[in-house]
Image: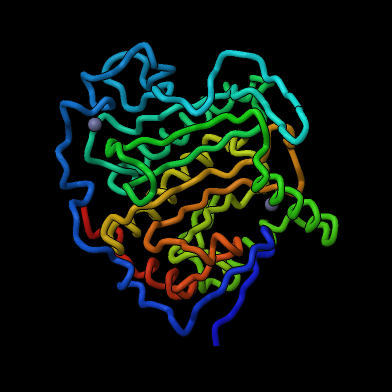
Amino acid sequence: MPELRQNIATKEWVIIATERAKRPEEFVLPPRPITEHRPDWEADCPFCPGNEELDLEVMRIPEDGPWQVRVVRNKYPALQREGERLRTFKGVQRQISGVGYHEVLIESPAHNTCPALQSPAEVSLILQAFKIRGREIAQDTRVEQLVWFKNHGERAGTSLAHPHTQLIGLPIVPYHIRARTEEARRYFDDTGHCAMCHMLSEELKDGQRLVAKSQHFAAFVPYAALSPFHIWILPRRHESSFLNATARELADLGEVLRLVLRKLYLGLKDPDYNYVVRSAPLLDPGSEYLHWYVTIVPRVTQSAGFELGSGMFINVALPESSAAFLRAVDETSIP
Ligand SMILES: [Zn+2]
Ligand SMILES: [Zn+2]
């Protein structure tokens, strides 16, 4: 019989369609050029070395010589840096001026790479750059929420192949994040615990849905995963904000994130995916009930009318099978 599962932290329900469940291998999409088979440089790529638009540059690492990572302002930003955050109400129309940040982090000078193919140190450097920019943007009192996200591949929403991540600083806290914050607070009030810390310890004990673990992090497919191979990477130390992750934790996360993405790359043949760093709203620092994490969503299925109409998902993969499949992928099978 199919079953409905609820995520205790987010309170979201999902239908696990056990009757229609596919085998993990069935999620490999038809062959197409995978990342490593692209050219390593393209003349018309704005992110390739030699094509840098220096007027958009915010920072680069290292500061001198050939760069490893660059942060630039988005050429077509969703929000504008300059201006006042003004709220207006007129009848039923509520508005805030579109001030904020929209930056792009170029993850490598190489056009044909991605975190799965990079070294752990390179992935850690990307995370350090996220933190540096995040902390700087957080100084701006007009910004209430930071969202770091990666779109890898067309099904994940990108048309630019060069490896990059984006950071948006919003002048509001979106409804979705507000609702999750409220659930986390409620869980804490009811039980005296952080829901994520509780979930983490249960997943480590159970082990069926674990994909990888390290000194500071654990990666698992949540019990109520919304889609196939949906993965959460949680820090073991309770902390609400990614901005407070230590250098040691980021070095460790570089290894775990790269390992998990490498398993997806090899197991599912370079699937399109999004990953997101979920961190507390800037005005909720040091919260006892919020716990930052990274979520990875491979785009191997598409949502449709039911998802739109109900806000809930049908997952056609058993979370335990997705995790077992990824655990079995030998990440050392490419150099
Ligand atoms: Zn490029
Ligand atoms: Zn916690």
- Furthest residue to the front? 91
Above or below — where is 309 with respect to 93? below
Above or below — where is 173 with respect to 330? above
Above or below — where is 45 with respect to 293? above
Residue located at (31% from left, 73% from top) = 26
Residue located at (69% from left, 51% from top) = 180
Q: Is residue 144 visible?
A: yes
Q: Is residue 89 left or right of residue 312?
A: right
Q: Is residue 204 visible?
A: no
Can you give x and y, in whole percent of width and height, for residue 209 in the image?
A: 51, 69
Quadrant including the N terminus: bottom right
Looking at the picture, tell me which residue is in the foreground, 302 or 23: 302
Looking at the picture, tell me which residue is in the foreground, 80 or 67: 80
Residue located at (84% from left, 60% from top) = 190
Res. 313 image quadrant: bottom right
- Ligand 1 visible in quadrant: top left
- Furthest residue to the right? 189
- Furthest residue to the top? 55
Can you give x and y, in whole percent of width and height, for residue 282 in the image?
A: 68, 32
Can you give x and y, in whole percent of width and height, for residue 29 in the image?
A: 27, 63
Can you give x and y, in whole percent of width and height, for residue 200 in the image?
A: 62, 61
Looking at the picture, tell me which residue is in the foreground, 50 or 330: 50
Q: Is residue 4 left or right of residue 259?
A: right
Q: How is the image coloured?
A: rainbow
Q: How many marks?
A: 0
Q: Is residue 273 left or right of residue 182?
A: left
Residue located at (58% from left, 44% from top) = 278
- Furthest residue to the bottom? 1
